[in-house]
Image (cartoon, coloured by chain):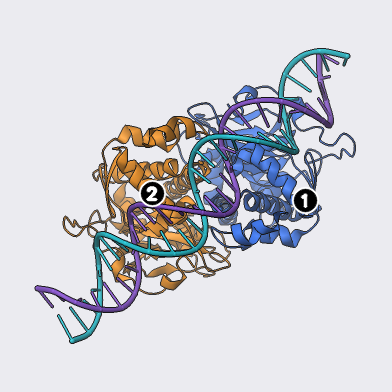
Chain colours: A orange, B blue, C cyan, D purple
Amino acid sequence: MLATHSLEKPMKTDVRSCGTRADIAFGAEVSRLSAATCLHTLAQIEATRLEAILQRLGPEAVRLEPGERLFAEGDEQHDLHVVRSGVLKTRRIGVQGEELVLDFHFAGELLGRGFLSGRPQRCEAVALTAADVCRFPMPALEEAMSESVELQRSILDRIGRAIARDQDHAVLLGRPLAQARLAGFLHELQRCQQGRGESPVRIQLPMGRADIASYLGLVIETVSRAFTRLQEEQVLKVSGRRVQVLDSKRLCELSGEGAPACGATSVMRRRA
Amino acid sequence: MLATHSLEKPMKTDVRSCGTRADIAFGAEVSRLSAATCLHTLAQIEATRLEAILQRLGPEAVRLEPGERLFAEGDEQHDLHVVRSGVLKTRRIGVQGEELVLDFHFAGELLGRGFLSGRPQRCEAVALTAADVCRFPMPALEEAMSESVELQRSILDRIGRAIARDQDHAVLLGRPLAQARLAGFLHELQRCQQGRGESPVRIQLPMGRADIASYLGLVIETVSRAFTRLQEEQVLKVSGRRVQVLDSKRLCELSGEGAPACGATSVMRRRA
DNA sequence: CGTGTCGTTGAAATACTTCAATAAATGTGG
DNA sequence: CCACATTTATTGAAGTATTTCAACGACACG
């Protein structure tokens, strides 16, 4: 019931505008990446040579509007996708039609992971904002990886980082306090933005509360309350999807630098 | 505080004996895999040819006793590990020294995932039972993957499955009811055993309650109570680490085939 | 046979979920 | 440009589950 009603609709209302005013362009037009930048990491491989390899692969540029699907559960297509601009989410649809958000994908990140095995996709990818995605056909990529150890290493490295993110997600979900989960989520978002050279203090959330709730294993009301309390504690300034981090250190502490399954006594007391 | 006290000790008491009697050999001696079987999947590649490739890699056989570490957080060694027999867990150690169990690894499964990137390991691997692990040096493997598309595909496929498991883990952690998480965990364990050709009804848990609790994002008492209630509902028969699945269908239902973030009304009512 | 670890059980405190209502924001149409 | 309808987000109150604190029982080990 969470999101079944908005599976297909483009949902234009979703992302474009966030604050009534102070509406800065987010994601869509900022930091568009070249095909080569999409796959290389840490200058392990010379961009020129990589570009040549990638061109031969015939990468397909995909343009998505908010709400559009890149691929669906059960798809047999196993290409490698890399986000060039915008934000997407991957999710599973539960037996009762409920949404289960697995991850959010920003510019430069791998998508889907379904390309790794020959099995059908177990999740679907939906654009949260307008987005550009680079699609590399898997068979060609497979061949290219054989020829270029650098490319192979580069892709494995990216996969490794995606796995690390998944594990961070699991760690986050393991925390008992909603505040800790939200704090960890925002902190990760901060690092994420910083990594792309954007401001780490102003966060423009590309996803709604429902997406955050699902990602954090909470209900929407709890997320809302956690936002409010984080604001009351002077850690954040929240205004819809516009979030300003006032105290990054505290945010990090709250995210779980505290105790493993406690926090109650030390953290909760600060509520009033 | 969860497990800092048992980080290094071999902890002989941990696994070897579970039921006072009825003590069957678990994991250690059962289903030991050949070096070739370690890496091939679905007969995509002829075992003979693969065996030749793998031999050239100079795989190292590692023998672990319960409680021994295969690698630690921060290690710079990036080899690929495959479990040949026994069970291991990967975990992170939180800033306060608390344990965070990320996954359990059974025979045939990849380990660590740290080999993918050049960065230091972010988690450590510890043997739960006596275990045999196959270690493939990464540089050689990298080269071999370039030469053999089958090997490359095989490894990517395994990575893909490991990622799918991580996602299942996240989905599990997203469930609000302890019963649902435990049920899902046991159900997964069932499928896991079945996949290795073992009995799906009798489960011999290689890990303690603390490991399960950490993996499920719960405290140990809650796990214990969940076991008890699952037993009261005639779904399981529990005796320490020996679990018998009486109603596999119910177990699956309880695991989350129910509602996304509800279950309370429909599931909890059955408590009495 | 005591000691230590592991697992279970009980009672109180706390946090989350649920249900319900309200407020804010977006988009549409007049 | 404003009013209306829809979606999204916030807030309140009650119910329920988990955590916490504490004690007990079971089982290996020395």
Chain label for disc 2:
A
Most foreground residue, D27 or C21? C21
Most foreground residue, A216 or A148? A216
Q: Position of residue B206 (x, y in %)?
A: 73, 39
Is residue B136 at all visible to an observer of this figure? no
Above or below for C24 versus C30: above
The residue type indicated by label 2 comes to Arg
Query: Mark 2 = which residue?
Result: A225
Residue under the image location 47 percent in, 28 percent down = B95
Q: Position of residue A123 (x, y in %)?
A: 51, 63
Query: Mark 1 = which residue?
Result: B232
Looking at the rendered structure, the secondary structure element under dot 2 is: helix
Is residue B184 at all visible to an observer of this figure? yes
Q: How many dots with numbers?
A: 2
Most foreground residue, B122 or A37? B122
Residue under the image location 48 percent in, 52 percent down = A218
